[in-house]
Image (tube, rainbow, N blue to C red):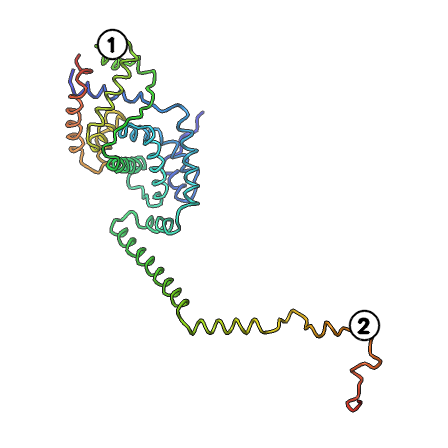
Amino acid sequence: MDSEESISKLLRLKRYEQPRPDYFEDFLAEFQLRQRAEVIHRPFWNIAWDRFSSLFSPLPSMRLVAASSFAAAVIATGVTLNWSSQEAKTSPATWNLSSAAQTRLESAPSPFTAPKKRVSSLQYVLPTRPTGYASARSF
Amino acid sequence: MDTPETPDSELVSRTQAGDARAFDELVVRFSPRLYGLVYNMTASHEDTNDLLQDIFAKAYRSIKGFQGKSAFYTWMHTIAVNMTINFLKKRNRRKTMSLDDVDSGILSDPDFIKATSHGDPSQDANLVELQKKLNESMLKLSHEHRAVVTMFDIQGMPHAEIAKILKISEGTVRSRLFYAHRQLQNHLQEFMKH
């Protein structure tokens, strides 16, 4: 027998090596579980990159362009966020303005709370003469 | 009367439109075949299970970019082979085997009877010995040669299909097979003297 053929026949016997019968049913269930877990735990930038790159995947050169522009967008966003947070922390003008505004807000009377004076002078007996009828010259 | 099987292309289109159940159907359809491919390259059930999960996860994430220029079958196999070779490169020299059980049908296979008729009359002992020897011999091949042997000899795929999956010429497939067979013959001499 040709040795090429006999080695092929021997190797073909490896087809009899099989996982347990219910393995493939469990495999699908495990796949679905892993997919759900991945959706929950995957970082946002990773999902965004996948979506973005899938638009360009058929063309290798376009993938390179996509990767460059995605990286540029991520860096630009990071720099902008960092810059604005730095500015908010260090700028004295912004700090003074906001603290002054806060002080004003705290000291101003709330339109929704009744003044204490009025509460203490509540009257349940009407005066003999209504204030509206009082003469300007009357003492 | 059985309903005809939904074509792969339709399931792919439905998945691309956001139907996750269509992809589940593709997983059911392709997992046995891809399992065989990965298992025969890694000789480890545990590694195969983990890798196969990663392969389908990767396919699901990239399916929107699949344009249908090749068959979905070819596309899936390319992902599987590339990911398995990358995994094997990282695994490097750790070659512990965790082998699946061998189906009892092998005991009545004429090729098995011929191959094991020389030694121990106990077929179980022959079976264990042959399985171990076959897997050890496969692990001695380079990753690229093992991929070709797995697809051609074990899975019965034609040269042209293997060439498309590996993105090499048919001639390269044939030469890799020739070289791999010669190496395997040296390791499996005892089962080939007939």
Q: Which residue is drawn at 33% across and 30% down?
A: B35
What separation in Å lies between label 2 and label 1 (alpha carbons)?
115 Å
B146 lies above or below A137: above
Q: Residues within 10 Å of mark 2 (few under 14, many from 20)?
A: few
Residue occupied by mark 1? B120
Q: Residue at x 33, y 48 (%)?
A: A54
Q: Indicate the chain on which mark 1 is placed.
A: B
Mark nearest the camera among 2 and 1 is 2
Extreme-bottom residue of the structure: A137
Left or right: B179 as drawn, with respect to A118: left
Tell me, yes or no, whether the two marked residues, 2 and 1, touch with CB atoms within 8 Å. no
Q: Which of B165 and A77 lies nearest the eye of the viewer?
A: A77
Instruction: Name the quadrant of the C terminus of chain B.
Output: top left
Left or right: B169 as drawn, with respect to A26: left
Amino acid at dot 2: Tyr
Instruction: Name the quadrant of the N terminus of chain B.
Output: top left
Amino acid at dot 1: Asp
B94 lies above or below A58: above
How many numbered marks are there?
Answer: 2
Q: Residue at x 17, y 30 (%)?
A: B176
Q: How crowded is mark 1: few (under 14 residues within 10 Å), some or many (20 or more)?
A: few
Q: Where is residue A24 in the image (x, y as percent from the top left)?
A: 39, 28
B111 lies above or below B74: above
Q: Indicate the chain on which mark 2 is placed.
A: A
Q: Which of B159 and B113 lies nearest the eye of the viewer?
A: B113
Residue occupied by mark 2? A124
Extreme-right residue of the structure: A128
Extreme-top residue of the structure: B121
Classify residue A23 by image quadrant: top left
Q: Are marks 2 and 1 on the same chain?
A: no
